[in-house]
Image (cartoon, rainbow, N blue to C red):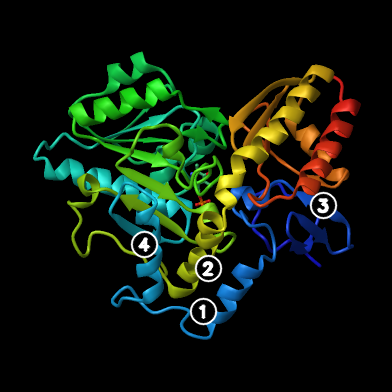
């Protein structure tokens, strides 16, 4: 198989995968791996889940795609389900996380326009954040390595320091139309926002009439132990971006908004050809049914604690572990050694994990991961810790 026709945008592992079941995945030579990457927090029900197979099969016999000129039962039901589980009132469907971020940024800009203050177009974003690779999402991604080769980016954006209340106050004004934050920075290194910080962000958004946007693309959809991540922080954003686990591996994204954020929207403002297609929405409905009604979200905290407690014990034993980070099943292990080498060593032993930031290894198991698979992953991690020296 010649792989030379795939554009060179990723440094890939030398492996070709063929099939997966639950938290296990197999390459074309039949080698088995425990999958603690889950398509980067996407395959929340693992591989080959019967509910997803069934939804794809049944919906594909009915309707795969129509157009947003018409209603379909599945996008209506999916929006209803999301709203029932949030403090918000409307949903815009798209196909990816990046597109959800684009939609949210446009809501903030329109919100600014409607206030009548012509200068109200500034979007604040965080150092070390990650929101996607399109020109808009990239413009609010606070990492030089992603931005530097693609300037000029969009104007009217301002980077501030994550979790720094002074910096926040110094940069907030009536010209700010929105601020975008990951409650837990995923790509940036599993950095958890302080509740006090988020409360201050909420307060300043109210004082200055700006939209608070939470990017829950990685930390939402049950990964922290509640369907929406914001519920763990007791701060209600105006806009939530979701994607990744929303489709359990099928591409779908969404922008969830309250009245403050969506009242400015009129037909023609935003759109998507595939957004809200019946197939994607049927899959997502099946996923949410498992996550919420099937009790999987409720099991996340316990599983996360189980892994975390084992990791604390390993930290006492192996001094290459610096810190155990994160919440629920969004787990980071910061290392005193190169995380890339560590990830490669895990890979060779049959465990898929991924790096984050400069020194963190991320564990993103499926949310329905079994005890046996958690133990297997921990066993491989321990084997690699024991062989790694600082
Ligand atoms: C993955 C991710 C995105 C981008 O989502 P895509 O589906 O790859 O476009 C944006 N924000 C966060 C926090 C993410 O983890």
Q: Is residue 99 visible?
A: yes
Of 390 and 295, which appears nearest the observer?
A: 295
Q: Which element type, helix, strand or loop, lies under badge 4?
A: helix
Mark found first going from the N terminus, 4 or 1:
1
Q: Which mark is residue 238?
A: none
Residue holding disc 3: 33
Looking at the rendered image, the quarter that the N terminus falls into is bottom right
Q: Which mark is residue 283?
A: 2
Which label sits in the foreground, 4 or 3?
Answer: 4
| Alpha carbon distance from label 1 to label 2 | 8 Å
x and y, in percent, of residue 251 in the image? 52, 62
Tell me the quarter of the picture where residue 194 sits.
top left
Residue holding disc 4: 79
Mark found first going from the N terminus, 3 or 1:
3
| Alpha carbon distance from label 3 to label 1 | 31 Å
| Alpha carbon distance from label 4 to label 2 | 13 Å
| Alpha carbon distance from label 4 to label 3 | 35 Å
Residue, far bottom? 61
| Alpha carbon distance from label 4 to label 1 | 17 Å
Residues at discs 1 and 2 in contact (Cβ within 8 Å): yes
Q: Is residue 160 visible?
A: no
Instruction: Tell me what residue is drawn at x 88 percent, y 57 percent.
Output: 31
Q: Which element type, helix, strand or loop, lies under badge 2?
A: helix
Mark found first going from the N terminus, 4 or 2:
4
Mark found first going from the N terminus, 4 or 3:
3
Looking at the rendered image, the quarter that the C terminus falls into is top right
Q: Is mark 2 within 8 Å of ligand 1?
A: no
Tell me the quarter of the picture where residue 375 sits.
top right
């Amino acid at each position: 198989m010649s792989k030379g026709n795939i554009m060179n945008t990723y440094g890939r592992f030398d492996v070709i995968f063929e099939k997966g079941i639950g938290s296990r995945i197999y390459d074309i030579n039949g080698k088995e791996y425990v999958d603690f990457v889950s398509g980067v927090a996407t395959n929340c029900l693992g591989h080959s889940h019967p509910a997803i197979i069934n939804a794809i099969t049944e919906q594909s016999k009915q309707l795969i795609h129509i157009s947003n000129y018409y209603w379909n039962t599945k996008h209506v039901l999916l929006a209803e389900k999301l709203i029932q589980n949030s403090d918000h009132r409307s949903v815009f469907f798209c196909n990816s996380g990046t597109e959800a971020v684009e939609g949210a940024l446009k809501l903030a800009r329109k919100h600014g326009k409607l206030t009548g203050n012509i200068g109200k177009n500034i979007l604040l974003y965080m150092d070390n954040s990650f929101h996607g690779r399109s020109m808009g999402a990239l413009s609010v991604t606070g990492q030089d390595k992603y931005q530097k080769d693609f300037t000029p980016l969009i104007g009217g954006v301002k980077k501030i320091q994550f979790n720094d209340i002074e910096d926040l106050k110094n940069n907030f004004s009536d010209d700010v139309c929105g601020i975008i934050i990951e409650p837990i920075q995923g790509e940036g290194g599993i950095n958890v926002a302080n509740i006090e910080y988020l409360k201050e962000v909420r307060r300043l958004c109210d004082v200055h009439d700006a939209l608070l946007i939470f990017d829950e693309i990685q930390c939402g959809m049950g990964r922290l132990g509640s369907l929406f991540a914001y519920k763990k922080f007791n701060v209600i954003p105006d806009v939530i971006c979701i994607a990744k686990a929303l489709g359990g591996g099928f591409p779908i994204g969404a922008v969830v908004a309250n009245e403050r954020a969506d009242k400015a929207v009129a037909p023609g403002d935003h759109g998507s050809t595939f957004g809200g297609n019946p197939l994607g929405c049927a899959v997502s409905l099946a996923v949410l049914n498992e996550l919420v009604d099937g009790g999987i979200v409720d099991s996340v905290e316990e599983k996360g604690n189980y892994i975390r407690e084992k990791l604390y014990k390993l930290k006492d034993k192996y001094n290459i572990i610096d810190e155990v980070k994160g919440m629920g099943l969004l787990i980071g292990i910061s290392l005193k050694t190169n995380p890339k080498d560590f990830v490669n060593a895990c890979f060779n032993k049959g465990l898929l994990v991924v790096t984050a930031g400069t020194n963190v290894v991320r564990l993103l198991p499926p949310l329905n991961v079994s005890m046996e698979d958690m133990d297997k992953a921990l066993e491989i991690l321990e084997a690699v810790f024991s062989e790694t020296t600082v």
